[in-house]
Amino acid sequence: MITISRKITACVFIAIVLGLGVMSLRSLGDYSPKGSQDQGLDPVNGELARDVESHYDDGFPVRELGTNLWAAINYTLFREGRPGVTVGEQGWLFTDEELFLGAETPAVIDRNLERVQAVAEHLRSEGVPLALLVVPSKARLYSEKLGDLQPVPEMRALYQRFLTQMQPAPVVAPDLLPNLADARFKGTQVFLRTDTHWTPAGADVFARSAATAIQQAFSGQAWGDTEFKTSLGETRKHEGDLLTYLPLEPLFPDLGPDPETVTERSTAPADDGSTSAESLFAETTADVVLVGTSYSANPLWDFPGALKRHLGRDLINVSDEGQGPFQPMTEYLRSDEFRNHPPELVIWEFPERYLAQPVQSEATLAWFERRENLLAQGSGPGRPSMQ
């Protein structure tokens, strides 16, 4: 009986392996070597073999099955995803960056606070004021969705510490959390469930509050000269960036959080008829410049458009996605646009969680190091010295 059982087990195992092997061979059916028609991959040095292996691995069915199955078990039984995401209640997902500290985070926070002040002081030396718009974390506004798990004390204190630290600095840093919290209390969803970013409605609330604070702080400037109109576009399904930590598709998509939708928005001057063809091609001057992260760079949220509408004034958006807040800022400060056309005001959108993240860009680190060296030598951080 034992011998028969072993034979059956061996046959089943062989059948499974052969079945998976046959299935995996389908991925070779649509294989085409990389490279141009004139110059393909060299089989002698192994380029062709590596390309075939990579294509085969990507199409191997066990990889997709194992990834989806393990993700389904972790999510449904343990309410967990891959490292980097915290699974909350009712399908809410949060980035770990808002909850936990890295090994060197306390020192990183101190260093980044110094860097923010260094940017503000550099702008002041150039005669340019700075408005710092600190974006509260999603975990702060929706802490009850985290259940029993809450951010560590250092992260809970981060937002207020950020604003307090900026008070002596030459920077306007309004507290915009209460307005977001009030809008959320009144029924507006200000952050997406499965994304690190805000909703277009949340971006609009933030922009309105920020515009009020900016107009009060810089009352001597011209505000409200231009009327902007926001139009609603298509409502479409949105795949939140945190869903990449829950690889349930394509086998188990129904086990994950409910899908979300986002209604596209676009903002333009209200009086389009007055815009001449000549002005469309005229050189744009950067009177007000917005620098920020994907909260400002991604057109889906239309934050720059909302800010224009509430300020009643056009602005130049030099934000960038996936780079954090420091890299777009130092790139702008090094640019010809800043040197040749210094703006009347710089608005810096800065998500609070990035204060606890180390700066990775070598060019950004070099900018701060060069500034420190110039100060140590007794040289002012003027525009020519920081090229």
Image: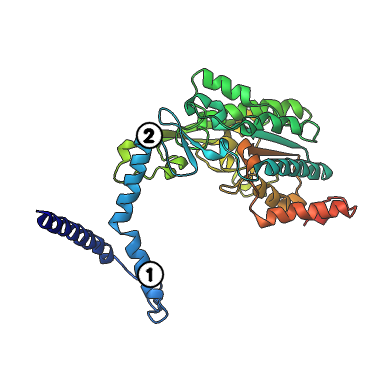
Q: Which mark is residue 218?
A: none
x, y percent for residue 293: 60, 43
Give the mark nearest the N terminus, 2 or 1.
1
Viewer-side residue, 12 vs 242: 12
Q: Residue at x 70, y 33 (%)?
A: 162
Judge whether 366 appears above or below 325 on screen.
below
How far apart in space, not on screen, are marks 2 and 1 (Cα)? 36 Å
Which residue is at a point 68% across and 40% down the rendered structure image? 106
- Badge 2 vs badge 1, beta-carbon distance below 8 Å: no
Tag 1 residue: 51
Q: Which residue is mark 2?
A: 257
State the residue in front, 129 or 250: 250
For disc 1, the neighbor class at 10 Å (few under 14, some 14 to 19, many from 20) is some
Q: Is residue 257 left or right of residue 354?
A: left
**Residue 281 horizontal side relative to residue 60, left or right:** right
The C terminus lies in quadrant: bottom right
Q: Amino acid at mark 1?
A: Asp
Which one is in front, 208 or 244? 244
The disc labelled 2 sits on which kind of residue? Answer: Pro
* Type of colouring: rainbow
Secondary structure at badge 1 equals helix
Query: Where is residue 337 shown, x and y percent of the image?
Result: 71, 51
- Residue 250 screen position, x and y as percent: 31, 46
Q: What is the x, y in percent for residue 361?
A: 65, 54
The answer, for residue 273, to whether it is visible in the render is no
